């Protein structure tokens, strides 16, 4: 079994097994070969071979391969960067329910890359991915509500989506939720909660959160009672 061979780092056997299956039209094997060549797992990294196998699987409706092919074109790895082709494959994958592709397609609509810029389309795809608990989509939704992009500005809904992503450990959302608590936007102002979420984001290695946390401690008098409670 190719998966067992791969998991035990017997990459030679994994490649042999998957190659045989891929040439017979098995889309999972084609996808797995694409991954091996894309990331150089057990083989020399070769983007052209990765694209070849991703495309075979993608053209046969494999959602993850479609997403991977979209990423290849987005980054321009082994091919000329092509946002239109990237968006095409992200859409194929997104329409099959792939949450990662949905958030990436939403981002392309938000930025107008490879598609006509549309906040409404961005919101649509972010919502689909967010309902599948994709943290980055939840964060992006929060930012759109916070900034009023394509929708009425609503800090309460921004806080709702930031919280969902923050609870999954998504550091940018933890920082954004902390800032809402600090300012009292969409939530009741609460310096203790602000500090808690800044700490979580900082502990995850988010540099801006670490910087903000330093400023909070430097100006601890602004937080009054909270620091007395912590002593």
Image (spheres, helix red, strand yellow):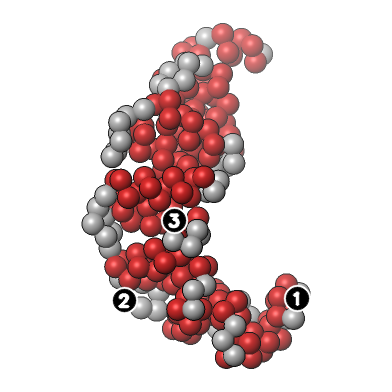
Residue 180 seen by the camera: yes
Q: Check contact, mark 1 vs mark 2: CB within 8 A.
A: no
Alpha carbons under labels 3 and 1: distance apart: 30 Å
Q: Earlier in the sequence, mark 3 or mark 2?
A: 2
- Rendering quarter of residue 225: top right
Whichever of callouts 3 and 1 sits on the residue coming sooner in the sequence is: 1
On screen, residue 226 versus residue 139, left or right, reads: right
Percent across and percent down for residue 62 are: 52, 72
Q: Quick one: quadrant of the N terminus? A: bottom right
Q: Are marks 3 and 1 in contact (CB under 8 Å)?
A: no
The residue carrying mark 3 is 102
Quick one: label 1 or label 2, which is nearer the N terminus? Answer: 1
Identify the residue under disc 1.
4
Q: CA distance from mark 3 to mark 2?
A: 23 Å
Residue at 49%, 78% (x, y): give it: 60
In which quarter of the view is residue 70 placed?
bottom left
Foreground tag (3 vs 2):
3
* Crowd band around label 3 with a 10 angstrom C-alpha radius: few (<14), some (14–19), many (20+): many
Q: Position of residue 193 (x, y in %)?
A: 55, 22
Residue at x 38%, y 37% (from the top left corner) = 143
Q: Which residue is mark 2?
A: 80
Up-down relation of residue 178 to residue 125 (above or below): above
Please say if 10 is above or below 103.
below
Which quadrant does the C terminus fall into?
top right
**Left-right relation of 147 to 180:** left
Q: Which mark is residue 166?
A: none
Q: The residue tagged with tag 3: helix, strand or loop?
A: helix
Q: CA distance from mark 1 to mark 2?
A: 35 Å
Label 1 CA crowd tier, 10 Å (few <14, some 14–19, many 20+): few
**Residue drawn where x is 40% and y is 79% of the image:** 78
């Amino acid at each position: 079994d190719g998966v067992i061979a791969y998991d035990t780092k017997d990459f030679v056997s994994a490649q042999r097994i998957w190659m045989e299956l891929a040439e017979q039209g098995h889309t999972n094997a084609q996808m797995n070969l694409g991954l091996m060549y894309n990331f150089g797992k057990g083989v020399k990294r070769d983007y052209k071979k990765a694209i070849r196998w991703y495309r075979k699987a993608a053209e046969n409706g494999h959602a993850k391969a479609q997403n991977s092919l979209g990423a290849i074109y987005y980054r321009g790895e082994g091919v000329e960067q092509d946002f239109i082709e990237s968006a095409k494959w992200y859409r194929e994958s997104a329409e099959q329910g792939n949450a990662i592709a949905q958030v990436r397609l939403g981002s392309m609509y938000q930025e107008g890359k490879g598609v006509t810029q549309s906040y409404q389309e961005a919101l649509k795809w972010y919502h689909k991915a967010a309902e599948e608990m994709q943290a980055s989509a939840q964060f992006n939704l929060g930012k759109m509500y916070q900034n009023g992009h394509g929708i009425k500005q609503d800090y309460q809904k921004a806080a709702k989506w930031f919280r969902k992503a923050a609870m999954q450990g998504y550091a940018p959302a933890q920082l954004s939720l902390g800032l809402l608590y600090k300012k009292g936007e969409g939530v009741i102002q609460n310096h203790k909660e602000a500090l808690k979420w800044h700490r979580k984001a900082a502990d995850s290695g988010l540099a801006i959160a670490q910087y903000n946390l330093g400023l909070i401690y430097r100006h601890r008098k602004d937080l009054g009672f909270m620091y007395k409670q912590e002593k």
